Image: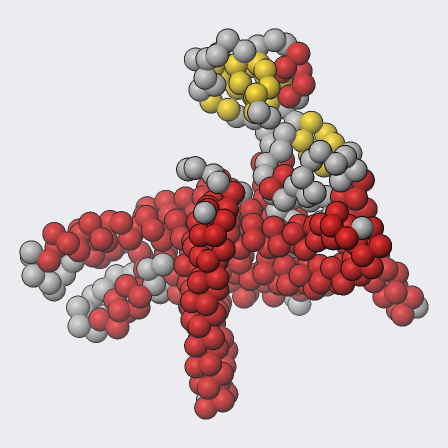
């Protein structure tokens, strides 16, 4: 059961994080195309926001790892 | 000449990637064990693995009820009769619990290596600037130029950008040293027998705790006012807002620690798992399939290594950047309530 939950959870995390980071990438590329001179600032903001999404996704990934490895905290 | 050098370096790099494979192949000789021990590659050990797989056992230091015990390594602790092994962990032979375990472990050693390298590089650069090289003249040589690129990047693009006013000068030291130290700690994980010590929650939690204390010690009046007496809202709302804000103080460094830890850990587990596919394939389909598929897995691992080298620097950058953002939020002083509304909005957006 733990393995099933971990696998499903990891998949859902990947979906969520993928959508999130994809949207950041989409809007960042659009903004750079619209205003190429601001690409440096946009890139910084993009990395920062992607880091937040990644952080949340990795929280979930850790929970999945704990489930799969049967570690009780 | 340059072509020859490039070829030699490329060959060495490929051999370095292949080497852990051969070591792991030796280790998977006995059939009773699981095919590949993923977590064993990730967790802390009581020895330091040298080039070639030789092990140097590290000292164990315990405190039991105020008495200190020093042992040269785990084996001598067991030999003394005071401690015994139970499920690969040392416990007291007489059943008492160890009150403090100050043993030196492989992760701790690599933290020290990272710090020593940081100290060495910064002191070396400082001595150069004191002599006037770089301060009055142009910086000389590749290493000093490289140092200056990183330092100016941290100072101008991170510290100046996110910490308002003249206050950034105070924090450039911390931000730069934490960036260098985390970069080195991450990059050590790419060495064939090295350990990415940031794949340990205790290490990242310590780093995040340092950021936390620096942030709170330098908190301005407005920072604390925002925590306890959020301005401009109905007094009854403060019953809800104050606990949330106090919680927010702790979730920020917590997220900082988890992010670095999980990134490095997942990179490490991924590499072990993909290399482990060779042995899993060998176990299921026989050595011929394992051998022929290994070309693919080793290639994939090489790509992952490049990705990991990038992620190592990126995570160090993100840790430094977020530290700067949190410090900047804490030291900021709002003189005019209405003008600073936009900065308040970004401050609350940057929660996780």
Q: Indicate left or right for B12 with B60 as reference.
A: right
Quadrant of residue B342 within the rendered picture: bottom left
Q: Can residue B248 be spotted in the picture?
A: yes
For image coordinates 7% across by 57% down, the residue present is B235
Q: Indicate left or right for B309 with B69 as reference.
A: right
Position of residue B228 measured from the top left corner of the image (x, y, whole percent): 17, 51
Q: Nearer the viewer, residue B138 or B196?
A: B196
For image coordinates 20% across by 49% down, the residue present is B243
Q: Nearer the viewer, residue B297 or B162?
A: B297
Position of residue A62 measured from the top left corner of the image (x, y, whole percent): 47, 50
Position of residue B247 measured from the top left corner of the image (x, y, whole percent): 27, 49
Colour setup of the view: secondary structure
Q: Indicate left or right for B332 with B127 as reference.
A: left
For image coordinates 61% across by 8% down, the residue present is B81
Q: Nearer the viewer, residue B192 or B280?
A: B280
Location of the N terminus of chain B (image quadrant): bottom right
């Amino acid at each position: 059961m733990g393995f099933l939950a971990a696998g499903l959870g990891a998949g859902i995390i990947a979906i969520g994080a993928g959508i999130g980071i994809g949207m950041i990438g989409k809007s960042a590329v659009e903004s750079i195309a619209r205003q190429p001179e601001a690409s440096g600032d946009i890139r910084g903001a993009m990395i920062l926001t992607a880091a937040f999404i990644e952080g949340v996704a990795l929280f979930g990934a850790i929970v999945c790892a704990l489930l799969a490895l049967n570690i009780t905290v | 000449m340059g072509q020859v050098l490039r070829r030699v370096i490329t060959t060495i790099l490929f051999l370095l990637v292949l080497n852990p494979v051969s070591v792991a192949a030796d280790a998977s000789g006995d059939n009773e064990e699981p095919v590949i021990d993923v977590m064993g590659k990730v967790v802390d050990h009581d020895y330091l693995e040298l080039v070639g797989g030789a092990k140097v056992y590290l000292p164990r230091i315990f405190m039991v009820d105020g008495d200190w015990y020093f042992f040269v390594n785990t084996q001598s602790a067991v030999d003394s009769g005071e401690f015994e092994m139970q499920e690969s962990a040392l416990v007291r032979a007489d059943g008492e619990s160890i009150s403090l375990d100050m043993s030196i472990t492989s992760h701790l050693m690599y933290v020290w290596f990272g710090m020593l390298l940081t100290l060495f590089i910064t002191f070396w650069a400082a001595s150069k600037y004191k002599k006037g090289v770089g301060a009055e003249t142009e910086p000389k040589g590749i290493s000093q130029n490289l140092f200056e690129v990183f330092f100016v990047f941290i100072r101008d693009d991170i510290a100046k950008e996110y910490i308002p006013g003249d206050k950034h000068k105070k924090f450039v030291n911390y931000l730069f040293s934490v960036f260098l130290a985390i970069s080195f700690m991450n990059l050590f994980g790419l060495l064939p027998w090295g350990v990415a010590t940031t794949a340990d929650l205790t290490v990242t939690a310590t780093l995040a705790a340092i950021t936390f204390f620096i942030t709170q010690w330098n908190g301005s009046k407005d920072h604390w006012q925002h925590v306890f007496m959020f301005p401009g809202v109905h007094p009854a709302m403060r019953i809800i807002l104050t606990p949330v804000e106090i919680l927010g103080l702790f979730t920020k460094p917590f997220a900082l620690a988890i992010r670095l830890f999980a990134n490095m850990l997942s990179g490490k587990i991924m590499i072990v798992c993909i290399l482990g596919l060779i042995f899993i394939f060998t176990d299921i389909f026989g050595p011929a399939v394992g051998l022929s598929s290994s070309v693919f897995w080793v290639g994939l691992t090489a790509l992952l290594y490049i990705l990991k080298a990038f992620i190592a620097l990126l995570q160090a950058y993100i840790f430094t950047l977020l530290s700067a953002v949190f410090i900047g939020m804490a030291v900021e002083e709002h003189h005019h309530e209405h003008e600073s509304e936009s900065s308040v909005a970004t401050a609350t957006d940057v929660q996780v």
